[in-house]
Image (tube, grey):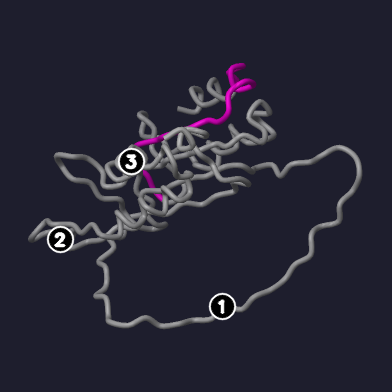
Amino acid sequence: MMSELVHFSSLPEHSHLDSAIVAILSHGVDGAIYGTDSQLVKLQDIFVILDNAHCPQLQNKPKMFFIQACRGVEADRGVDQRDGRDQTASPSCEQSDAGRETGKVRLPTQSDMICAYACLKGTVSLRNTKRGSWFIQDLTEVFSKHAKDTHVADMLVKVNACIKKREGHAPGTEFDRCKEMSEYCSTLCKDLYLFPGVSDRL
């Protein structure tokens, strides 16, 4: 897996392409996934291969990662929703921009990346034995419907909403009525549309 990713990161085509997508479906633990040789590959090692330092052809270009794998062994038993909504105020803070120096533009080592995970840290991801993993089902459905006019981060919010509604049905097992919650993290610096301009022509 690592050798394939290294080969992928070195492709000269990246210089004239707009973005890159890496989708990985496997078993996993917190922070790592299993390869076909049953060895763990750290997700951070995968991100590094395509970062600004190791793949300069993709600097300032969005890199999308979709990780379908467990991130732990805990099953989310869920909680019962109560009526009403608590209002919590979060403290605000202000921070000035870092001092700007004249000269060569520098980039953070990792930027312009967005990574979507099937489940929360420490929990298992769930699947339907006939239709496959919940996350991949909802990801493909949402992207198929909305990629023409919605940016990627907003589509992943829709995926989160779909996953939130799902509930395991496996009477007599530990997974009956279990829940799952997908999440994403992002260092994107712009809204990312997979088909820019298409919505303008519709």
Q: What's the residue at 37%, 40% (across, down)?
A: 143
Q: What's the residue at 51%, 33% (across, down)?
A: 197
x, y percent for residue 189: 63, 47
Q: Tell me the quarter of the picture where residue 14 sits.
A: top right
- The amino acid on which the numbered mark 1 sits, given as a three-letter code, is Ser
Work out whether mark 3 precedes mark 2 in sequence or the reverse, and give the earlier one. 3
- The amino acid on which the numbered mark 3 sits, given as a three-letter code, is Lys
Q: Can you name the residue that lies furthest to the top here?
A: 12
The residue nearer to you, when weighing 60 against 70, is 60
Q: Looking at the image, is mark 2 or mark 1 nearer the viewer?
A: 1
Q: Is residue 80 above or below residue 141?
A: below
- The amino acid on which the numbered mark 2 sits, given as a three-letter code, is Asp
> Counting other residues with Cα less than 10 Å from the Cα at mark 2, is it few (<14), some (14-19), or many (20 or more)?
some
Q: Which residues are magenta?
A: 10-29
Residue assigned mark 3: 145
Residue assigned mark 2: 176
- Badge 1 marks a residue whose secondary structure is loop
- Badge 2 marks a residue whose secondary structure is loop
x, y percent for residue 159: 35, 50
Give me the C-alpha separation between circle 3 and circle 2.
Answer: 30 Å
Work out whether mark 3 precedes mark 1 in sequence or the reverse, and give the earlier one. 1
Q: Can you name the residue that lies furthest to the front here?
A: 201
Q: Is residue 22 magenta?
A: yes
Residue assigned mark 1: 90
